Amino acid sequence: MADRYWVGGTGTWGSTQTTNWSAATGLSFTASCTGTTLTTTGSPALVAGMTVFSSTHVSLGTVVSGAVNTWVVTIGGTYGSQAMSAATVGASVPTAADNVFFDANSNSGTSTFTCTMANTPRVCNDFLASGLDGTMTLAGTSIGLTVSGSLTFQATNFTRTYDGTTTFNATTTGKTITTNGVSITGVNFNGVSGAWTLGSALTNSGQTTLTNGTLDLNGKTLTSGLRFTTGTGTKNLTFNGGTLICSLSGANSFVNPAPTGFTTSAGTGTGTITLTSTTAKTFNGAGSTFNCTLNQGGAGALTVTGSNTFSNITNTRKSVSAASILFTAGTTNTFADWNASGESTRLLTIGSVTAASHTLSKASGTVSADFLSISQSTATGGAGWYAGANSTDGGNNSGWIFTAPPAPSGSNSNFLMFF
Amino acid sequence: MKIDFSFSSQYGTFSDALHLPDDHGLTQDEINAMQQQRFDNWIAVITAPPVEETPIEEV
């Protein structure tokens, strides 16, 4: 494992270019140049062989000799006093075992620069963009980035325009992903026995694929603009109070085509999977157990397919409009808790996709809902399924009680006895 | 330093964190603005999602 530092400002991160890679971080300083004489302000630790870059990242050649503040470079030119940088370039292109760094010495002064990735995928172990004092753009057309370690994007002075998939393929635990508000365009998690923890929200406008490894949301929000899907492998989604947002509409908002080997863990706090599309969308659980809350978070009808198990179900859309949650006929979905209700004038419709019944099961306790419109629904499992006094029986239901649940024993009776 | 924050919305809760240098020099208003921008960007993503056309292969 080696470290690779990006230096010299704008350049290409391809499979062969070594112009912008150094084994050590570069130097930043102020200097002027006349001919091949470089005059620095102060005494930067220049050494022979370092390449010097102007404020616009034009190479002044390499340092031949010099000391303190007077140096001889191979190319030179006429440059007034300005921010410059220098580094020993030519280190090998990072491999999947190498850490890559983008820092304050990747450019000259506060100049902007672009690192354009070529030859997909670009690979590295850790990717760390930190300390940048000029805006860096990480670019590349149809270029993916495969990270075998951790990834950190800087909160400021960092822009991503590469449009390929970012793949995390670590095979050990303890990796972190901190995108710091920088969105990406597709992400794969595919490292056998790997584990990643979100350090910040991860907003992905593309597809999210969980194939191998453990993804810990760590209380943060993971947003998948295209489908969230599973791949064949051993994979775990841990919430620790985090939220998975699936914003795609249609049949593939959340799909689980490889349920074998797929587990979810609640961790600490309440995890949530929310589907937010304003048009119809589907949660295809494929019969897995989801140790989290399933939330209807968008105006479009939410269809749940498969006989799944959930910790809870909610409907945050009720604060805005009516909504629907539909289940595939013939399936049984099991809940530890049920907190899906509507509100006055904004009913939540519970029904089947087709004209046949589905089953909802809760083993014990009481479901206390209200403002539901229920049809084709069999409520069972041992719990008392109280739809609420303001709910509507749309027909073909079983097990639902269309009243409010009875008051807890001892509360009202004691109150009346007191008077 | 890490600053955790969250926003509640009709779409559920957005939870994020700002990772900043210890000497970031930002004012609280600037930090609040960064947090609001994160939330606004998130809302923009989830309220204008692309529509996927390609059918998937069922297992």
Image: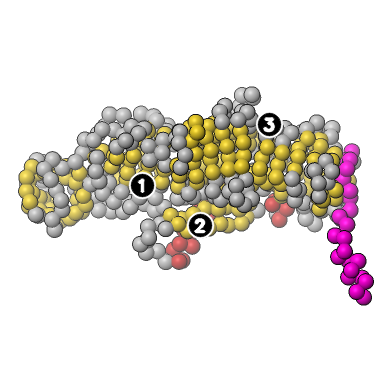
**What is the secondary structure assignment of the residue under circle 2?**
strand
Instruction: Determine the residue positioned at 36% across, 32% down.
Output: A96
Answer with left or right where residue A121 lies relative to residue A314.
left
- Let me know if marks 2 and 1 both belong to one chain: no
How far apart are labels 1 and 3 at the CA level? Answer: 39 Å
Which picture quadrant has residue B54? top right
* Secondary structure of residue under mark 1: strand
Residue A80 can be seen in this image: no
> Can you identify the residue that label 1 sits on?
A129
Three-letter code, disc 1: Ala
Give left or right: position of A4 versus A199.
left
Camera-side residue: A266 or B23?
A266
Looking at the image, residue B39 lies above or below residue A237? below
Q: Residues within 10 Å of mark 1 (few under 14, many from 20)?
A: many
Q: Position of residue B48 (x, y in %)?
A: 57, 44
Per the rendered image, the range of residues in magenta is: A396-419
Secondary element under disc 3, as helix, strand or loop, is: loop
The amino acid sitting under disc 3 is: Ala
Q: Which residue is mark 3?
A: A286
Q: For residue B4, which numbered disc appears in the image?
A: 2
- Residue A409 vs residue A370, the one in the foreground: A409
Q: Would you say residue A405 sits in the magenta stretch?
A: yes
